[in-house]
Structure formats: C-alpha cells, structure tokens
Image (tube, rainbow, N blue to C red):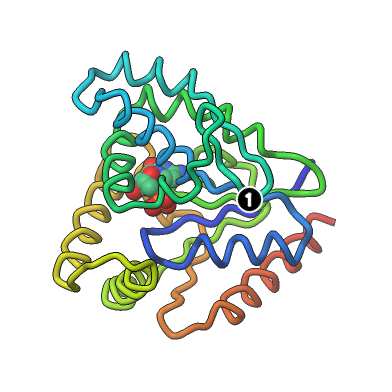
C-alpha cells in the first residue's frame, strides 16, 4: 500500500508550507487540495456562475480542465498559480466547498494524486474522507491570533493592502463555515493535533517526520 500523510487544518495554520517541506524531505508527491477548490472558484467566477445551483456547479467541477505541471497550476491551459491565491477566490472556494456535488466531483481527482513512493495531502478532509487509510493523520493548527498575523504578513508581503481587523474577521468567517458545513467539516477527530503557534516550520516538520517514522515502523 502506498503511504499517505494527511495534513488537515484551518486557514493560515501553516499547513501548505509544512506539508510541502515534509513531501520534499521524504521524496513524496504533494497534493494541495485547497487549490482544487480555488480552481473551481476561479472557473465559476470567470463564467459568472457564482449564484448557480448545485447541479450546474457539480457538472462544471467534474469537467474542470485542470493541469498541475511542475509548480504551475493551469486552468484551460492558462497559468493561474497566483490568480487562485486571492482572498476572493478563497472565500468563494469555501462557499462552493459546502456543496456535496462539488466535493464528490473533486474526490477522484484528489485520489489520482496517490502515486508511489507516497503522498503528502493537505486540506480539510484528507484524513477523514479522501484518504481514510492514511498512515499518519495530522491536524495542524495555531491560535486565531497567530493565524491572523501570518495571513496578514503574507498579504502585505504580496503587496496587498489590508487591515488587520478585516483579516481577523475573514478568517473567523471562513473557520466557521469550514467547521460547521454538513459535508466533510473540518474536524480533528482521529488525527494527532499539532499546534504550531510557538513552532518554527522546521520544528513542525520535524514533529511530523518523527510521528511518520514511528507509524511506518509499526506498519512493519
Ligand atoms: O486551504 P485553502 O485556504 O486553499 O482552501 C480554500 C477553501 O477550500 C477552504 O476554505 C475550504 C475548501 N477546502 C475544502 O473544503 N476541503 C479541502 N480538502 C481543501 C479546501
């Protein structure tokens, strides 16, 4: 069986960076499942379908012309690696992700990332729904204050003009929606919780690698 490390957690918890570094270190493939939800959002917004019903959104998601080529993410051939990172795209992604038809349309696509020698998958439901067989399930989190500060710094460094109060409010809204949706809500049950509030990226990575080698040894 190909090993999977599932890393789930709320927005701005540092999941993306930590998961990529763990994948790099182990020579594993990496799945940024949030990018698929963001790509769906971008496609929906570009077609002006923000208010469309679930059935239409499900069809569109199933037919999404997406390619991951090296570090580039492409939608219908166009590189959208940066375009999907906006706050608007994140919000629409969070809203669309509450539709079961959208989630199930992305399920196979996510599972197709599973290839030898292994996969590090980051998202909200990697351990609970997409890869329930994962050898290690981590719930990566940090206090709301630390996450808001990280997101704020990230946006400022990208040259985006934001104020802290808006960042805090946006994070709170997104957390609330991701945690309370009916299908595949963000839930730490069954995962090892890693609070990164006081940890560096290297420390968080070291903890995950230590847990992984412990579990891998157990598997035999
Ligand atoms: O991780 P992110 O901020 O790029 O994800 C954007 C949104 O996509 C997130 O707010 C909720 C949704 N999402 C999801 O529902 N399930 C996942 N596995 C990943 C993301």
User: Seen in the image, is 202 located left or right of residue 125?
Assistant: right
Q: Say whether mark 1 is within 8 Å of ligand 1.
A: no
- Relative to 8, residue 68 above or below: above
- Relative to 192, residue 123 above or below: above
User: Which quadrant: the C terminus?
Assistant: bottom right
- Relative to 177, residue 142 above or below: below
Instruction: Pick the residue in front: 106 or 125.
Output: 106
Q: Residue at x 41, y 45 (%)?
A: 84
Q: Which residue is mark 1?
A: 71
Which residue is situated farthest in the bottom direction here? 198
Q: Where, by quadrant of the figure, is residue 111 drawn?
A: top right
Instruction: Pick the residue in front: 216 or 202.
Output: 202
Instruction: Give the image location of residue 90, x and y in percent.
Output: 33, 48
Q: Where, by quadrant of the figure, is residue 95 drawn?
A: top left
User: Seen in the image, is 134 located left or right of residue 48?
Assistant: right
User: Which quadrant: the N terminus?
Assistant: top right
Q: Where, by quadrant of the figure, is residue 59 drawn?
A: top left
Instruction: Give the image location of residue 50, x and y in percent.
Output: 23, 28
Which residue is situated farthest in the right direction here? 220
User: Seen in the image, is 117 located left or right of residue 132?
Assistant: right
Which SS class for mark 1?
loop
Q: Residue at x 41, y 68 (%)?
A: 141
Label 1 environment density (alpha carbons within 10 Å; few <14, some 14–19, many ≥20): few
Instruction: Give the image location of residue 114, x and y in percent.
Output: 70, 39
User: Seen in the image, is 172 located left or right of residue 4?
Assistant: left
Instruction: Pick the residue in front: 92 or 104.
Output: 92
Q: Residue at x 49, y 62 (%)?
A: 15
Instruction: Give the image location of residue 75, x and y in percent.
Output: 50, 32
Q: Residue at x 28, y 40 (%)?
A: 92
């Amino acid at each position: 069986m190909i090993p999977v490390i599932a890393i789930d957690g709320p927005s701005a918890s540092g999941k993306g960076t930590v998961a990529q570094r763990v994948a790099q270190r182990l020579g594993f493939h990496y799945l940024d499942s949030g990018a698929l939800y963001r790509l769906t959002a971008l496609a929906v917004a570009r077609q002006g379908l923000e208010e469309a019903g679930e059935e239409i959104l499900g069809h569109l998601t199933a037919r999404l012309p997406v390619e991951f080529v090296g570090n580039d993410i492409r939608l219908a051939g166009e590189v959208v690696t940066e375009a999907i990172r906006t706050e608007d795209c994140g919000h629409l992604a969070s809203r669309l992700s509450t539709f079961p038809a959208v989630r199930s349309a992305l399920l196979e696509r996510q599972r197709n990332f599973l290839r030898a020698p292994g996969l590090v998958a980051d998202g909200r439901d990697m351990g609970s729904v997409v890869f329930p067989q994962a050898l290690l399930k981590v719930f990566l989190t940090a206090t709301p204050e630390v996450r808001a500060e990280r997101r704020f710094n990230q946006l400022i460094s990208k040259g985006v003009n934001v104020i802290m109060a808006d960042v805090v409010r946006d994070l709170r809204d997104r957390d609330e929606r991701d945690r309370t949706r009916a299908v595949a809500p963000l839930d730490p049950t069954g995962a090892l919780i890693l609070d990164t509030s006081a940890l560096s990226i290297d420390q968080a990575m070291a903890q995950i690698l230590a847990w992984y080698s412990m579990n891998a040894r157990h598997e035999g």
